[in-house]
Image (cartoon, rainbow, N blue to C red):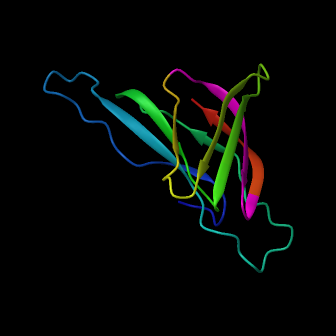
Amino acid sequence: MLLASAFTAVSWNAPVHSKEKRRTERCAYELVSQGIPADMQNYQPFKDTTITRDPACTGHMLRLPAMGTSTAYEIVEVATGERVLRKTFPLRRMGYGWDITERTGTYLVRMLSCGSSGEFQVTIQ
């Protein structure tokens, strides 16, 4: 269920349980974009999204994708105004994994890359 050119959080691996039914796996989530449609007026390429963490996982990672020749992310916790992440990386990297295991709440994500930029909110539950 992806919206064209909107960042959407998707889970890309499921937890694995041991025979004792204990939580043993890290879950990963990814922000996904499909590109900007040429025929839409006043189109916003970024969309707020919510990540609902799987309680069966022991850890949680959100992958921030690389876009353009260089990508920079700045993430600020909305409630406190505290900057919790600032990361820049080149295209040849596959992105960056942000550990959200201990995070809850709403975060303002500012993304800047060659050819695309904007801001949106990610709520982590």
Q: What segment carries the magenta color?
A: 102-116
Q: Residue at x 86, y 67 (%)?
A: 42
Residue 60, x across and y down, in percent: 45, 32
Work out which residue is located at the far right of the displayed protein and give it: 42
Could one spot residue 92 in this view of the protein? yes
In the image, is 5 to the left or to the right of 1?
Answer: right
Residue 114, x across and y down, in percent: 72, 61
Could one spot residue 55 in this view of the protein? no
Residue 76 falls in image quadrant: top right
In the image, is 81 to the left or to the right of 28?
Answer: right
Tell me if residue 111 is in the magenta stretch. yes
In the image, is 105 to the left or to the right of 62?
Answer: right
Residue 65, x across and y down, in percent: 56, 52
Residue 56, x across and y down, in percent: 35, 28
Of residues 99 and 51, the one drawn nearer to the viewer in this rendering = 99
Q: Residue at x 51, y 48 (%)?
A: 30
Task: Tell me which secondary structure the magenta stretch mostly adopts.
Answer: strand
Tell me if residue 74 is in the magenta stretch. no
